[in-house]
């Protein structure tokens, strides 16, 4: 009604009228926005984020076994608690570290066949490493790069995701007439062949169904980001095989096996060694057992859930498989803490933090999956602390997290994952019991990264899993849970309920496109927006996070704050400053 006269204006004046229309909309919008109550962000105590004072220690702490690599000088706060490298500013340090890690990955050298080194190897070394791909290496990278693109708007990140997915689909899938058809092989048994055809331990023909489910889930996200149907088609094929193969499972067998021969359906073997798992050996663990058990099914659950929501593929079968797997997770590992193996290079049984805490993160994002999710998540955290806490760095006020029961060495990825999960739990419940240590875990893990972005696993190697795909995402999730951990001098999207297909950051605006019409976003911004446009219509400021609109919560006195945006329709968004 307000601008109906525009339709009667001569076309020569149309641009002027449209400009005037937008201006009047903005004035109208600002007037309405002024009626919204100004909110102050109520997060963690500022002294948990900002040190009152800090100093560098002279301690020599070695990264490598041979004492050739040192930690950077360790910085601590007024209480002796570890602060991040390279500065006492948490947000600035985290930002520098994750961008350095991405830059090193993106600029990594080419290897045999003119393909990127990270497509052939799980460990980076200057003179190259003889081992092949990590089992979940590319899926971890997809997960991190999805979030990092939203955070930075760098188009080359999506290009990298497409490059990896295209190569993997072309060189790594089981054949269509195999018993376990159209699933990715996790390893290149002939390292420089460029072909993925088996498992690192069991050899040719074996694959890991849990990694297939994770790949399918990431392919759906890539489809939503790029609108390329080949990614959706591949995800549906993966889901079809997994849905057809699901079993009820029991205490010794998960709904799908950990390792299986794609052609024959033979379940693989685990080879246990007493010196690696002495506590299990003492309880009568056999030297050889079936590799019929793992709990890394979070990606598979999300694969089925996404396809059902989209109405793609055999949604009836997906729904049945989803509930079969979920009920097994709730009945067995959630109760007995038998979290089982994950890693491709471990011969025998091991209980792993990644399986347990990834499931905890899933439950916090999908409360409907377990109505008792708070107690389940707390029990998982208690198991991790009881079984995998590492006190080696307690003099700096931090307890770090060991990778698994078969390798009790604290990890950059595992400590930062625990931190992100603890922060997410605080965000949802207000429980601060694990938060100071969580922040210090994030701080500790920054010391593994050098200025070039090489990320070293303590006393081990530059793992292209732990140091890259399974590292960046934890810092971004931590920032989303507590935006005070994000840098205060730049604008960043920290979380979305949708998938972002395009985003650009400019001095006076942020523009982005979501896959879904309905979505919720969370930003850390340097200043309050003056207007937000969805499509061609302004979005009004609100005081209710559950209602359509946007809410601004200021942080400190510098004008920065948090933007919560809740839209019910429209995919194109413009935030104007």
Image (tube, helix red, strand yellow):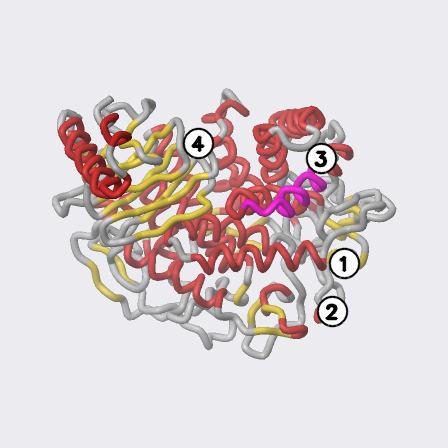
Farthest-out residue, right: 264
Q: Are marks 3 and 4 in contact (CB under 8 Å)?
A: no
Please provide percent x and percent y for residue 275: 67, 56
Q: Residue at x 25, y 43 (%)?
A: 12
408 lies left or right of 418: right
Is residue 228 inside the magenta stretch? yes
User: Label 2: which residue?
Assistant: 193
Cα distance between the residues tagged 4 and 1: 40 Å
Q: Which region shows up in magenta?
A: 227-239
**Pick the front one: 538 or 186:** 538
Between disc 4 and disc 1, the foreground one is 4
Is residue 538 inside the magenta stretch? no
User: Label 4: which residue?
Assistant: 517
- Tag 3 secondary structure: loop
Please provide percent x and percent y for residue 52: 16, 52
Cα distance between the residues tagged 3 and 2: 33 Å
């Amino acid at each position: 009604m307000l601008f109906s006269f525009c339709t009667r204006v001569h076309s020569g004046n149309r641009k002027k009228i449209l400009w005037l229309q937008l201006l009047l909309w903005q004035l109208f919008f600002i007037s309405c926005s002024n009626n919204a109550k100004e909110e102050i962000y109520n997060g963690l105590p500022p002294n948990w984020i900002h040190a009152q004072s800090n100093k560098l220690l002279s301690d020599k702490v070695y990264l490598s076994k041979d004492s050739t690599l040192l930690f950077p000088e360790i910085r601590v706060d007024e209480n002796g608690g570890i602060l991040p490298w390279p500065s006492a500013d948490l947000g600035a340090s985290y930002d520098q570290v994750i961008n350095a890690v991405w830059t090193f990955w993106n600029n990594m050298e080419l290897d045999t066949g003119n393909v990127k080194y990270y497509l052939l190897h799980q460990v980076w070394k200057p003179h190259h490493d003889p081992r092949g791909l990590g089992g979940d290496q590319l899926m971890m990278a997809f997960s991190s790069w999805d979030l990092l693109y939203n955070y930075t708007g760098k188009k080359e990140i999506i290009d990298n995701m497409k490059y990896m997915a295209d190569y993997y689909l072309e060189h790594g899938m089981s054949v269509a007439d195999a018993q376990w058809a159209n699933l990715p092989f996790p390893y290149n048994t002939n390292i420089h062949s460029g072909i993925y055809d088996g498992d690192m331990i069991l050899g040719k023909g074996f694959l890991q169904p849990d990694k297939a489910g994770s790949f399918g889930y990431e392919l759906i996200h890539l489809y939503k980001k790029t609108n390329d149907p080949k990614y959706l088609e591949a995800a549906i094929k993966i889901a079809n095989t997994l849905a057809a193969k699901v079993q009820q499972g029991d205490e010794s067998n998960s709904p799908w096996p950990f390792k299986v021969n794609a052609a024959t359906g033979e379940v693989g073997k685990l080879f246990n060694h007493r010196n690696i798992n002495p506590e299990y050996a003492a309880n009568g663990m056999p030297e050889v057992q079936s590799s019929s058990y793992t709990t890394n099914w979070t990606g598979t659950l999300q694969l089925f859930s996404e396809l059902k929501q989209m109405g793609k593929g055999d949604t009836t079968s997906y729904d049945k498989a989803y509930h079969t797997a979920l009920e097994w997770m709730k009945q067995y590992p959630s109760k007995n803490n038998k979290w089982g193996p994950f890693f491709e290079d471990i011969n025998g049984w091991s209980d792993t933090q990644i399986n347990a805490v990834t499931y905890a993160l899933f439950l916090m994002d999908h409360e409907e999956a377990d109505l008792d999710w708070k107690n389940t998540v707390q029990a998982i955290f208690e198991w991790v602390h009881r079984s995998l806490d590492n006190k080696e760095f307690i003099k700096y006020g931090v307890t770090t997290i060991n990778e698994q029961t078969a390798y009790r060495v604290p990890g950059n990825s595992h400590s930062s994952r625990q931190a992100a999960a603890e922060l997410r739990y605080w965000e949802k419940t207000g429980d601060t019991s694990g938060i100071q240590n969580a922040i210090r875990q994030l701080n500790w893990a920054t010391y593994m990264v050098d200025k070039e972005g090489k990320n070293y696993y303590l006393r081990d190697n530059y793992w292209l899993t732990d140091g890259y795909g399974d590292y960046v995402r934890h810092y971004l999730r931590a920032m989303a849970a507590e935006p005070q951990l994000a840098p205060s001098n730049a604008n960043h999207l920290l979380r979305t309920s949708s998938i972002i297909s395009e985003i650009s950051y400019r001095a006076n605006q942020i523009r982005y496109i979501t896959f879904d019409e309905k979505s919720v976003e969370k930003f850390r911004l340097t200043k309050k927006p003056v207007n937000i446009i969805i499509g061609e219509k302004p979005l009004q400021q609100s005081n209710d996070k559950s209602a359509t609109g946007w809410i601004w919560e200021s942080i400190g006195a510098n004008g920065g704050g948090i933007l919560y945006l809740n839209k019910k329709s429209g995919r194109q968004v413009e935030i104007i400053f």
